[in-house]
Image (cartoon, rainbow, N blue to C red):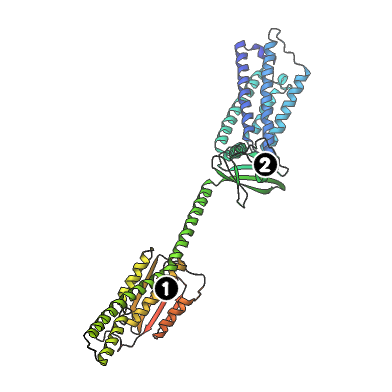
């Protein structure tokens, strides 16, 4: 190093500043290598190599300081310990450089080996006056390498995947995540889980198993409640947020770990509560509707009974008045006339039962419309009164069953004339039964249809359908076109 005495003092100062700059750059490289946090044996040797290169910058700075310190005497006195240190540092650079270069094939790792050879003590007497220039070349190459490594590591940290980048990504997750060893020692805890444990006053607990036990059965702070849900542990915080904690066990490379994650199910819980309220309201409405349906036949019967009473009152009143007048006038009608009058009386009383079928259907539709059920007819009822009345009876029973058991809101009756007779098909938009059970109402419908020579079929696929067929001879059919 005595050859540096021939350099001006300002040049030696610049070399010291250059060595210091290289040291700062290399320290930044070391920090970023450890910040990257990558795993693997080759990464381990790479970290040791960067530390050895940083120590070489320290060695170069010490050698330049030694030259400056001995400048007045003109002789550099270096003890044996410094020589041994120079050999050891070169050995570290050589060893770590080889083991780091083999798996990664990074030229910067192998390039630092010949450059570090400049610091070997035996090279000074061999190179003679050329040694300062070799030293300057080593210093420049080392600074260039540190700068290049720093730029590349910066790009890797911005765009690559590292242990810390994984930690940052986990911290950004809205769900709380905790990983621990099977012994309970916590390895990873993201920010969401930290906030949850803080809200539950569990930040002082460092055992994951104890945290899980306290979540399951421990006492909770005021304003926080444990909700009765089977899966996991569900807790409602004081701010109304609902979190579900789920524990799981995972195995990686033969090692067992515990995973505890928390999911924010506030919206799901609120939606479930709203659905429960609506279900309660629907059940109440269902009971009210069933009560109304239970009374609808009674209402119909009372209405028909009242109409019959009014009809009987009107018809009999007229006949009684006529008889009273005949008795007052002492004029007894003939027996044949009385029998004929009684026959007309019975015929007039029966006329209430043979009201136009269209009016009967309209009354039926009006009654069901009062409870929000739409009943409509496609086509027209036949002109034969017996068939039309039977159809009305089938429609009445079908719509009552559809509303009562299937909660239907729309019922359609389709009436169609064919060459063989009449087809009546009744469908609804209600819920179809799982299986068909014929009660008294269906049996009554079938009996009335078969009494007219027809057939009644009921199916539940693809939807609940009542189909009635009424056979009718053409010559006796007033609806048949003879042309």
The residue nearer to you, when weighing 52 against 296, is: 296
- Residue 324 location in percent, x, y? 25, 82
- Quadrant for the N terminus in the image: top right
From the viewer's perspective, tell me whether residue 313 is left or right of residue 35.
left
**Residue visible at 49% across and 59% down?**
283
Q: In which quarter of the image is residue 360?
A: bottom left
Q: Residues within 10 Å of mark 1 (few under 14, many from 20)?
A: many
Position of residue 319 relative to residue 302, above or below, is below
* Residue at x 64% of width, y 31% of height: 111
Q: Where is residue 388 in the image (x, y as percent from the top left)?
A: 34, 79
Up/down of 306 relative to 95, above or below: below
Residue 41 in the image, given as x and y percentages of width and height: 70, 39
Residue 263 in view (yes/no): yes
* Numbered tag placed on residue 211 in the rendering: 2
Q: Report the number of numbered marks.
A: 2
Cβ–Cβ below 8 Å for labels 2 and 1? Answer: no
Q: In this view, does 311 lie above or below 228?
A: below
Q: Which residue is drawn at 65% across and 47% down?
A: 247
* Residue nearer the viewer, 291 or 83: 291
> Secondary structure beneath disc 1?
helix
- Residue located beneath label 1 in the image: 398
Task: Select label 2 or label 1 by which is in front.
Answer: 1
Earlier residue among tags 2 and 1? 2
Viewer-nearest residue: 26 or 204: 204
């Amino acid at each position: 190093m005595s050859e540096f005495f021939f350099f001006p003092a300002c040049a030696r100062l610049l070399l010291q500043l250059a060595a210091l700059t290289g040291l700062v750059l290399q320290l930044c490289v070391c920090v970023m290598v450890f910040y990257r946090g990558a795993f693997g044996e080759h990464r381990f040797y790479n970290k040791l190599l960067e530390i050895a290169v940083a120590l070489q910058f320290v060695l170069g700075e010490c050698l330049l300081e030694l030259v400056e310190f001995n400048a007045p005497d003109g002789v550099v006195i270096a003890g044996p310990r410094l020589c041994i240190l120079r050999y050891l540092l070169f050995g570290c650079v050589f060893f770590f450089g080889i083991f780091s270069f083999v798996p990664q094939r990074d030229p910067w790792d192998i390039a630092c080996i010949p450059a570090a050879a400049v610091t070997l003590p035996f090279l000074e007497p061999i190179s003679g006056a050329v040694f300062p220039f070799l030293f300057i070349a080593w210093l420049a190459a080392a600074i260039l390498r540190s700068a290049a490594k720093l730029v590349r590591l910066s790009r890797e940290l911005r765009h690559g995947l590292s242990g810390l980048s994984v930690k940052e990504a986990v911290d950004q997750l809205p769900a709380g995540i905790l990983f621990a060893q099977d012994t309970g020692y916590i390895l990873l805890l993201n920010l969401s889980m930290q906030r949850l444990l803080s809200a539950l006053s569990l930040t002082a607990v460092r055992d994951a198993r104890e945290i899980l036990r306290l979540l399951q059965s421990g006492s909770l702070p005021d304003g926080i409640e444990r909700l009765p849900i089977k899966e996991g542990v569900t807790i409602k915080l004081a701010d109304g947020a609902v979190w579900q904690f789920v524990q799981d066990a995972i195995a990686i490379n033969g090692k067992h770990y515990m995973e505890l994650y928390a999911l924010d199910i506030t919206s799901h819980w609120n939606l479930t509560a709203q659905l429960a309220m609506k279900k309660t309201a629907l059940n109440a409405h269902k009971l009210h509707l069933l009560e109304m349906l239970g009374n609808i036949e009674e209402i119909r019967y009372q209405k028909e009974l009242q109409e019959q009473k009014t009809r009987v009152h009107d018809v009999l009143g007229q006949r009684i008045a006529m008889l009273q007048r005949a008795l007052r006038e002492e004029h007894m009608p003939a027996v044949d006339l009385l029998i004929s009058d009684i026959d007309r009386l019975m015929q007039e009383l029966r006329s209430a039962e043979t009201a136009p079928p269209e009016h009967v259907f309209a009354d039926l539709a009006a009654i069901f419309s009062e409870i929000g059920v739409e009943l409509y007819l496609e086509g027209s009822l036949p002109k034969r009164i017996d068939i039309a009345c039977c159809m009305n009876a089938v429609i009445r029973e079908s719509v009552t069953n559809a509303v009562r058991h299937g909660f239907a809101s729309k019922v359609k009756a389709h009436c169609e004339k064919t060459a063989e007779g009449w087809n009546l098909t009744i469908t609804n938009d209600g819920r179809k039964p799982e299986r068909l059970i014929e009660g008294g109402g269906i049996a009554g419908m079938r009996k009335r249809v078969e009494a007219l020579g027809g057939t009644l079929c009921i199916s539940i696929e693809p939807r609940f359908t009542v189909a009635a067929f009424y056979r009718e001879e053409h010559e006796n059919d007033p609806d048949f076109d003879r042309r």
